[in-house]
Image (cartoon, coloured by chain):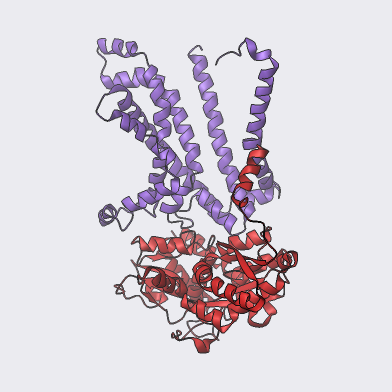
Amino acid sequence: MSRPGAGALRPSSYILRGLTLGYLGLMVALPLLAMSLQAAEPGLDAFVKALTDPFALHALKLSFVTAGLMVVVNAITGTATAWVLVRYDFPGKRLVNALIDLPFSVPTVVAGLMLIVLYGPSSTLGVVLGRYGLEVIYQKPGILLALMFVTYPFVVRSVQPVLLEVDRAEEEAAQTLGAHPWTIFRRVTLPTLRPAILTGMALAFSRALGEFGSVVLVAGNRPMETKTGPMYIFGEIESGNTHGALVVSAVLLACSLGVLIVLNLLQRREEARNGH
Amino acid sequence: LVGLLAVVAAGPTCDVPVTEAKEDVLTIGAYSVVREAFHEGILPVFAAQWKRQTGRDVRFEESYNASGAQARAIAGGFDADVAVLSQESDVDICAKAGLLDTGWKKRPGRGIVTRSLVVVGVRPGNPLSLHDWDDLARPGVRVLYPDPKTSGGARWNINAIYGAGLFARGKDDPDPSAARDLLARVQRNVLTMDASGRQSMATFDRGTGDAVVTYENELLLRRKITGTEVPFVIPPATLLIESPAVVVDASVERHGNRPLAEAFLAFLKSPQGQAILAEYGFRPLDAEQDTRPLPPRLFTMADLGGWTKIKKDVYSPGGVWDSLFTGQEAAR
């Protein structure tokens, strides 16, 4: 954390701060506040009743489980990708590096459609997989796949810069002392990367909790089976149950916020431990 | 920021020309299914007729949206002069907002302007030989229809299946448990419930599913537009879809164009209007004019007890629809 510079006391910096915070308030805090108030307005009993609705509970559970599984997969594949991009040279590396961010720029609906074309029940791959009893699209694996796709860049992009900065001297020292490469990775490199991996995981998780565009196409939207939290919210809004939708939104939002706050605390502790 | 929002808001509308007094404007808020029939068929002919009768040009402001969303838009301030919606409960949303007389259903013809049937689209040659709702419940048949939570159209489809079960012993001996059972068995075969009827058709077009439950007019319209045939079967017991159109009193009073709106509604119901709608796949209001056969055990929403009763029995929280899933889950 950098200290405020000498210019901090100039009035212009107050104006900048005021404007920035005002902007944040207007664009983020105000809509969130309005939503939370509306969700809370009919009272605690109504809130609990809307939340314990079996359809709402199942949708929330499905969102958490799929997002959780996705985060585990992405932590491993994302770190591996960052590792390959930083530590190895190969033809087309720049292109691969550019491809990583594609899931952010592709409209999520297109991502969903792409998955259907690739794995759908009428695609070649889908037919082959179906023969082995593995259905992807319109089933839970489809949800997982969509989440993995749209959140893939998070871990890669948070690990990559840290990995570039890593001082190779420690790894080399371990190597000369005869440590196995896996031991070096686990004991020397990984601890340095851990905060970055956690950051990527947390961002991916909160993004996945709210993911709608891609999931709605591939999930099948069957209540108590493949309907996720955001799909439940959409359905309830469209059928006039605004309060039920707001309550589930509020829970998803609170969890995302919670994850990000915990992440922040962890990072501070890590920084304190490292003596910054 | 406010300035930015103002610019964004003003953007799409700033090119609207200043209307001259010679031109009449009719704002139509309709559900998406009638888009082609209206835009290409009804509106040009009506405009010509209006010109002949009054010497005035008419310009249409058209909006097409999912029926429920359109109804909520109108109730929320979209000043449509004429509302053309999928089902009467959507018109009720506008009526409850005080935009028209809540007794609108009691008018002659109950405001109905289009009729169609709930049918089952199948693959060419009907390889699984699907003919009735029971066939859709056979193991391994993959069925598509949209989610009744987001699609008003899906409710026509689901009501058709429900009703076929309800009247299995005849209309005078309804059997609610058979209705729930048939619906549960078909729903078990549903692969994906898209947000709208059109999206369900798109999924079917991608080669997914063996059967799609939809409206007859949608499939006939596809034949007209694309020239490709989607084969379909009319189940022996199915539901007659009747969709209403109304003049929105609050809007026409503000715009001062009630005669135009009333004339438009009358045109929709006229033999000429009905003939155009029939070209786009709808069944004529006058059954005498219907050249296509009707299924033997056709029933209507009135036979089912009306929308209010069905909404309460089937779609309310804890109703038949919900019980399909909570019951299923508990049994596992």
Question: In the image shown, does A97 or B163 lie closer to the viewer?
Answer: A97
Q: Left or right of A244: which side holds B256?
A: right
**Which residue is rendered at x = 63% and y = 69% of the image?**
B57
Name the image quarter holding residue A193.
Answer: top left
- On the question of residue B243 being in view, the answer is no
Name the image quarter holding residue B66.
Answer: bottom right
Residue A25 locus on image (x, y percent): 66, 33
Chain coloured purple: A
Question: In the image shown, does B96 or B174 lie closer to the viewer?
Answer: B96
Q: Left or right of A14: which side holds B221?
A: left
Please tell me how many numbered marks the rendered image carries.
0
Question: In the image shown, does B65 or B239 lie closer to the viewer?
Answer: B65
Residue A58 locus on image (x, y percent): 51, 51
**Which residue is rendered at x = 69% and y = 68% of the image?**
B248
Colour of chain B as rendered? red
Residue B47 locus on image (x, y percent): 59, 72
- On the question of residue A257 being in view, the answer is yes
Q: Considering only vertical position in the picture, is B53 above or below B190?
A: below
**Which residue is rendered at x = 50% and y = 17% of the image?**
A271
Residue A36 locus on image (x, y percent): 65, 43
Q: Quadrant of the N terminus of chain A?
A: top right
Q: Considering only vertical position in the picture, is A60 above or below B235?
A: above
**Which residue is rendered at x = 67% and y = 73% of the image?**
B260
Name the image quarter holding residue B126.
Answer: bottom left
